Amino acid sequence: MLNRRDLLVQMAGTAGVVLRPSILGDITPDGLRDIAARRGLVYGCAASTFELRDAEFVLALAREAGMLVAEYEMKRGIIEETRGVYDFSAGDTLLAFARSHRMTLRGHALVWHHKNPSWLEDALSSPRAETLLTEYIAKVAGHFKGWLHSWDVVNEAIAPLDGRPDGLRNTLWLKRFGPEYIDIAYHAARAADPTALLVYNDWGCEMGAPDNDRFRAATLDFLEAARGRGVPIDALGLQGHLAAFGPQVDQKKLAHFLDSIHAMGLKVFITEHDVYDADGPMDIILRDRAVADSSRRFLDVVLNHGATIAVLTWGLSDRFIDPPSLRDQLIGRFPRQLPLDTSYRRKPMWNAMARALSS
Ligand code: XIL
């Protein structure tokens, strides 16, 4: 027995009516994964194992996502909480779920300056410190070898405001090994899993403010130099964290930047897309519309560029977003930055993404 939505879709198809994405979100069974796949693209999202215990969410996740990434459970603070003891259970659970739902899984993140185990910083002061980088990458990328679509090998290594001529962020890794830590990490990842695309992941290149101009320039210089040294980087990951009521994407600047990335032979992933709406009005309709408009403005550029192969949002539903400030909770203003609402219903952002993916 067809339900109302499927009946409408079938009647529209029979009548030769092409359903515009603006109403698509309400009646089509197609998920963002199907819409993306029709253009040879992948749509996915960040997920966590606790979310997989919600049967209703699993239905929405299986319908919408063609790729998963661990929001936090494949970071070093989880995998190697105790030095030398590796816990892959959460990553293995996400991998098994992905495989059983015809999804791929991407890895995030081998080298970052946040969410490291408490023992790491002291351990880096030891003489044999380099093995703390290379052995971890060999162990973790080796464990998932052959099963992952891609790895965010180094995450957020660029920070022009830190004032270095090379634009690099002054992290514990840079302090201990110098800029070479980046080369070491990518070569170790390639050796451990030659099948995974190796991605450099960062934020700051999306919007059009002067600081973003500096970020884009530093990123291009960084990637150009790394590729020139033979560092095996296959793609740039643009995190895609936007702000509905903040600085907006400058479409011309972004398109020009992507042209430069493409000219280097690099692919582009949108790895953590969401649209922060905390500075907006209380009115949900206005916030949802602004979130959708910001997402569409960004995706129209990145998805109409030959370099882009995948778009992932940093979660699928507003339900699992970290709660806002106590003040916002008291006035009842909760984040609405993802494609589905807290009841897993499609929002204007879903429609905007469907339009961008299908246009
Ligand atoms: C965040 C997760 O959302 C949190 O759950 C976790 O506690 C910390 O990391 N840039 C990144 C992501 O590359 O890994 C971060 O995710 C958000 C910023």
Image: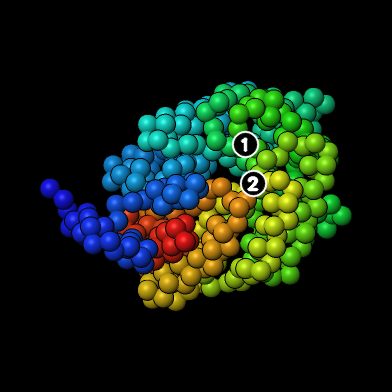
In the displayed structure, does residue 357 sit left or right of residue 166? left
Q: Is the residue 120 above or below the residue 9 in the image?
A: above
Q: Is the residue 102 above or below the residue 245 in the image?
A: above
Name of the residue lying farthest toward the left: 1
Cα separation, mark 1 vs mark 2, equals 10 Å
Question: Measured from the top left, where is residue 114 in percent x and y?
Answer: 64, 45
Name the residue rendered at 46%, 31% in the picture.
95
Question: Measured from the top left, where is residue 316 in percent x and y?
Answer: 42, 52
Residue 173: name its quadrant: top right
Marks 1 & 2, CB-CB < 8 Å contact:
yes
Question: Which colouring convention does the figure follow?
Answer: rainbow
Identify residue for label 2.
Answer: 267
Tell me the element at label 2.
strand
Residue 111: name its quadrant: top right
Please give the label number shown on residue 216.
none
In the image, 154 versus 89, the foreground residue is 154
What residue type is disc 2 on? Lys
